[in-house]
Image: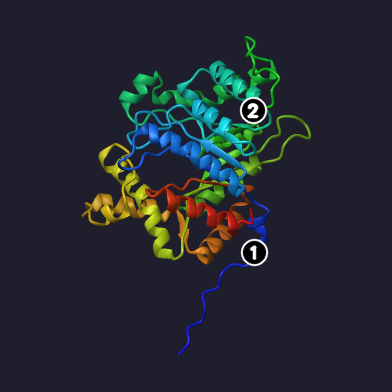
Amino acid sequence: MSTAPVAVPVGPPAVLARTRWSVLDRAQVRAGQTPAEALRATVDFAREVERLGYHRFWVAEHHAVPGVAGAAPTVLAAAVAAATERVRVGTGGVMLPNHRPLVVAEQFGVLASLHPDRIDMGLGRSVGFTGAVRRALGAEREAMDGFADQLAELLDYFAGRGPVRAVPAQGLDVPAFVLATGAGADIAADLGLPLVLGASADAARTRATAERYRDRFTPRAPGGARPYLVLAVNVAVAETDEAARRRQLPEAWAVAHSRTRGDFPPLQPPAAIAERRPTEREARYLAEALAGQVHGDEVTVVRQLTELVTTTGADEVLVTFATHDPAEQLDSYRRLARLAGL
């Protein structure tokens, strides 16, 4: 009795072909790797992402996290921009409550001056994960409440409306993006800025936030920009659904560990994770972490992404996947680039 062959996508669906595809790399540390090696690996990975045809390569800001080396996003973005030629480079993102808007404007002004028309300014409102980190940064939780004012001040420096001249930022056009959920999405809409929205396991909530952003969007000037939604999604592609799930296991386990033990560790090999006997809480958080992700063989991922992009109306997908084996990570991004028609 013959078995029907598995259908493999011949070309990208129209909705995926017209969507922009970008990458967010957090410079996550792998087990047995030093933070310095992780940072160099991020720069090397950016070169590969550029060769694959992705639109942007962004880096993140995390402080005092054992499993993440990306603590200074504008510094790392400078290294990435210098090592690449075409891909847009930015931050996903700089957490404004941790910084003075003038300093952020100056940093992006330097980046944009050195790499014209290639720099993006992704901005968020999060503060440190623990009280000790927040105190060290000088930004308690209440600082998040001032995000809208900080963001407006930052934009004023580029427009030449700040209380002092922000050299060399003043007069430069550096696209700003707001990383947000909930109330943060309203801030993006009120200021007429693109929104970077994290896709969650609660699909209805993700759709509702996207719809509210578009309905509330107010252009910064008459005839100005339209709403622009970037959907941040963890996507793993492999030969089989089970192989793709294994690829996402290291990061999902790190998330579960952070939720139960208070710190995000380096990425572990899937085999080592499989040997563990998780507690009930760890198992629950692990399942939740995996539920909020897209993974599977090529047919499965095309189906899931087509539904996600269609239902949210996303203009762009920012892929956030990382795993313990860098070769498997690159293979996943290579497969996705082919599926998206890059």
Amino acid bearing label 1: Gly
Residue 71 appears left or right of 10: left
> In the rendered structure, are the residues bearing label 1 and label 2 in contact, judged by CB atoms less than 8 Å apart?
no
Report x, y in % for residue 247.
40, 55
Q: Residue at x 68, y 31 (%)?
A: 117
Q: Nearer the viewer, mark 1 or mark 2?
A: 2
Q: Secondary structure at mark 1?
A: loop
As drawn, the label of residue 148 is: none
- Toward the top, the furthest residue is 164
Q: Residues within 10 Å of mark 1 (few under 14, many from 20)?
A: few
Q: Amino acid at mark 2?
A: His
Secondary structure state at the residue bearing disc 2: loop
- Residue that sits furthest to the bottom in the current view: 1
Q: Residue 203, image x and y in percent?
A: 50, 54
Residue behind mark 1:
11
Q: Is residue 249 above or below residue 181?
A: below
User: CA separation, marks 1 and 2?
Assistant: 34 Å
Residue picked out by circle 2:
115
Image x and y of residue 65, in percent: 34, 33
Q: Residue at x 34, y 34 (%)?
A: 34
Q: Quadrant of residue 116?
A: top right
Q: Nearer the viewer, residue 333 or 292?
A: 333
Give the image location of residue 198, x and y in percent: 50, 44
Q: Is residue 259 above or below residue 71?
A: below
| Residue 26 visible in image | no
